[in-house]
Structure formats: structure tokens, C-alpha cells
Image (spheres, helix red, strand yellow):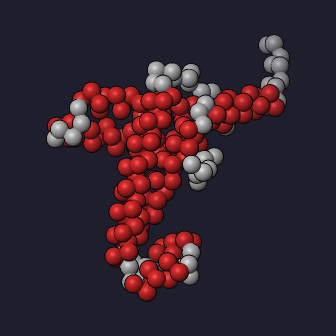
Amino acid sequence: MTAALYINESAVLLKTARAVLVECERNFPAWVAAGQMTQAQADKDLRRLAAIVADWRRIAALRVGQPAEPLDTSVGTFAKYALLRHLHEREQQQLAADRQAVRQALDPAIVNAIIAGDLDRPTIQRNWKERRAGFTSPTLGVLFDRERRAWTIEALLWHADRWPRAMDMAETQAALIARDRPAEPARAAA
């Protein structure tokens, strides 16, 4: 896997990890009731997701020199990686479906221009935001949201594949911030 977008965006990665956890907390009970997963698997995945969120909350805090929670070692690195790999695969499948929906919703001339490389992503996004003719399909907004989520999940997976580098780097950065922070002046005794 190559370096993903958002790999240095700790706050964005934390937000994505939290959103996935909330989504799973909301969806798992229905999936268990429908027989799509067992309660034991749901509980295990929620523990893994909570540990991933805790890791990124710690990393995000450390990277800006804030106090951080102690490292959560209740879930192993491989278990986190396996879950992120699964989430990444699922997100890529949904992204492919959303891209196909956009192809069907857009004017064929616009699709051909995109394929030919005549329209780049910033131009497409600007045209969609400005609601220009041919770019008003709500499926474009869904696609842009899905791409961002897929890219952030890919960045989480990228970090998990190189674990514990992200945590080590955040801890090193926090130590450097603390070292370089000016000492508080001694307060005069009253």
C-alpha cells in the first residue's frame, strides 16, 4: 500500500474512527438480530474499534502537545489491523458502487470528459458546489463524501500496517514540544 491521503491528519483520522464506531454501535444490533453477525463478533469488533479510537485520541493529543490518555493495550495490533483491513475492503466496495451510480447519473459528455482527463477533481468539485449545469446530481456529493471516508480509512490502515510508528512518532513529537516549551516562570512566594 502506498502512502494514503490524510496520513498526517490526526484530527481527521480520529473523527473518522469515531464515526465508524458510532455507525457500528448503531448498526450492529440490527445485524445481530438479522443473523448477519453474532453478538460475540459484534462485541469483539466494537472493542477493537474503541481501541482504535483510543489510539487516535492519544496520537492526536500527543501531536499537539496535549496531555494524553495512557496507551490502551487491551486489543492487539494485529486485531486492529484485521478490522481496519475489513473496513477498508468494505469501503472500497461501496466506493465502487457509488462511482458507478455517478456514472449513470451524470451526462455522458461529462463522464467522457472525466475519463479523458479533461476535467480534474477540483474542477468537478467546484462545478458541483456551484451547481453548474450537468453537475447538480446529489450522487456527486455522496461520492465526494464516500471518497473522503474511504481515503481516511485507507490512511488508518496505512498507519496500522506500520504500527507502532504513528504512536512512536506522536510520543516523540510530544517530547520535543515539551522540551522546547518555555518553562513557566517561578512564582514569587506570597
Establish if 6 lies above or below 10.
Answer: below
The furthest residue to the top? 189
Task: Let me know if residue 162 appears in the view.
Answer: yes
Left or right: 59 as drawn, with respect to 185: left
Q: Quadrant of the C terminus?
A: top right
Task: Let me know if residue 139 appears in the view.
Answer: no
Left or right: 3 as drawn, with respect to 85: right
> Quadrant of the rendered structure where residue 49 is?
top left
Q: Nearer the viewer, residue 187 or 11?
A: 11
Provide residue 1's location: percent of width, then percent of height: 57, 48
Provide residue 168's location: percent of width, then percent of height: 66, 30
Q: Nearer the viewer, residue 186 or 114?
A: 114
Residue at the image position 27 percent from the left and 42 percent from the top: 27
Residue at the image position 81 percent from the left and 31 percent from the top: 180
> Quadrant of the rendered structure where residue 93 is?
bottom left
Residue at the image position 41 percent from the left and 70 percent from the top: 140
Provide residue 64's location: percent of width, then percent of height: 67, 37
Total tally of numbered discs in the picture: 0
Residue at the image position 16 percent from the left and 41 percent from the top: 34
The furthest residue to the left? 34
Q: Nearer the viewer, residue 173 or 189?
A: 173
The furthest residue to the front? 1
Provide residue 8's location: percent of width, then percent of height: 63, 46
Establish if 109 lies above or below 35.
Answer: below
> Quadrant of the rendered structure where residue 92 is?
bottom left
